Image (spheres, rainbow, N blue to C red):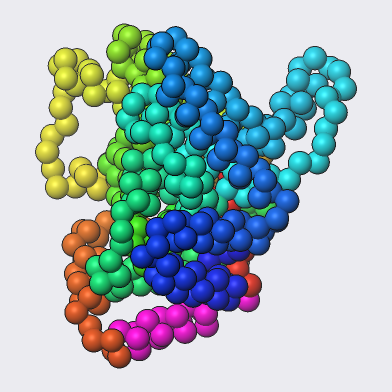
Amino acid sequence: MLFPTVDFAIFFTLVFVGHWLLAPNARLWRWFMIAASYVFYAWWDWRFVPLLAGVSALAQGGAVVLDRFPDEGRRRLAMAGAVVAVTAPLALFKYYGFISLELANVFGSPPLPLAQLVLPVGVSFYTFMAISYVVDVYRRDTDVASPGDVFLYLSFFPHLVAGPIVRPEELIPQIATPRDPRSIDVAGSAWLVMGGLFKKVVISSYVSAQIVDPVFGDPGGHSAIEALLAIWGYAVVIYADFSGYTDIAIGVARLLGFDFPLNFDRPYSARTVQEFWRRWHMTLSRWLRDYLYIPFGGNRKGRTRTYVNLLLTMAIGGLWHGAAWTFVLWGTLHGAYLVVGQVVARRRTTGELHQPERARWRPWVQRLVTFHLVCLGWVLFRADSVGTAADLLGRLVAGWDDPTRLVTPVLVAVVLGMLAVQTLPVGASVAIRQRLAVMRPVPMGIALGTTLFLITTMGPQGVAPFIYFQF
């Protein structure tokens, strides 16, 4: 079930009413919300409902078992076994075919028996959340929850199919806490939902159809200017698409009385790649840090090991996005960026490199350089093969004399406008939300209705699934 559809509007209306009517009865409310979340998931394909339930049962069973062992060695083994168990479905559906074909290519033998496996929507996200629960119980950062709480934690429909990745301590305590409908920030939630819909339905769909899909589909048939605008355009598309989804998810959760962590904070205003990852898909960045980078040793085992840990963490993060070498290279490229950033920072600290002069223009140059480093990675991320990525980058060198047909003033204004908005201070958004919060019900309803009308009018017929559904 997609957020920007009539189906979801009807579904959420029914769930919203049932949620608040049943809120005084905690037991009945919990099972109602689990059932609603499973209906939401089954709307895509009911055959994968047992997979979600199975991962939830494995996570809870593993947490219960390891929590009963007083011996640290047994607890560690139980934790490892539970992590392997909850990760196995993800490995099977997402990586079996990729590994089979790569082994066949390496050894020159027929591939392993290859089944046509459909990747279940959201499996990467709820698997990562299941791992968080098991590992946090092992670390004693969270207590073993009741089965109902764990099943709702992993299936709660606002985050189910594309995040954000919510930690156990961020959501499970909220499940057990009574909610007061009078405390709901309706204006702020509506701002998030409407803004998310606008970014997805209008901005992402328009830029993707006008420049990104045609150019990435046939790089050789387009000019250098079109290639450059397509690269910038994809930076806008993936931001508008993914941040739009998470804004809707956060807004919907808030209307139900739940707070999710923010997932984006003007990422293209970052002055370094390190800062970019503190602003982009923040829940994934924290997950990679806490469940991969730090367990690998972090920065505790020497400089060389730190660099290896960064590269390995980001390469795995790339592979998590998709079973293809383009994703692995994308993650490794960002790992290399982070390593270079650490090397430069260390050398400046020791005096081997001079500190840059302070100038008003320097932050803007840093933002511009960082943005284009990120865009280089986006080419790998979006391209269907390394060859396609190379062809597109090649057009930036050899295509300046070719005709430009796709670039229009409106398209340029949308792409550059979306990038410019990233540099606005966060206070501008806060001020708008505060003005909405003090509006009376009738003007607020008119404003929201007008916004929704513009979204449905300006958006295309039919809305494509969110990009991150495939991850």
Please give the name of the residue rendered at 77% of the width and 27% of the height, measured from the top-left corner: 101
Queried whether the magenta region covers residue 460, the answer comes back as yes
Taking the image as shown, residue 250 lies to the left or right of residue 163, namely left
* Between 280 and 168, the one nearer to me in the picture: 168
Please give the name of the residue rendered at 23% of the width and 19% of the height, measured from the top-left corner: 346
* Between 40 and 146, the one nearer to me in the picture: 146
Residue 451: image location, x then y, percent: 40, 81
Queried whether the magenta region covers residue 373, the answer comes back as no
Q: Quick check: can you spot residue 27?
A: yes
Please give the name of the residue rendered at 85% of the width and 28% of the height, measured from the top-left corner: 113
Q: Where the C terminus falls, by quadrant? A: top right
337 in relation to 189, above or below: above
Taking the image as shown, residue 191 lies to the left or right of residue 12, namely left
Of all residues, the one furthest to the left in this rendering is 358
Residue 458: image location, x then y, percent: 51, 79
Q: Which residues are magenta?
A: 444-461
Of all residues, the one furthest to the right in this rendering is 110
Q: To which quarter of the image does residue 22 belong?
A: bottom left
Q: Where the N terminus falls, by quadrant? A: bottom right
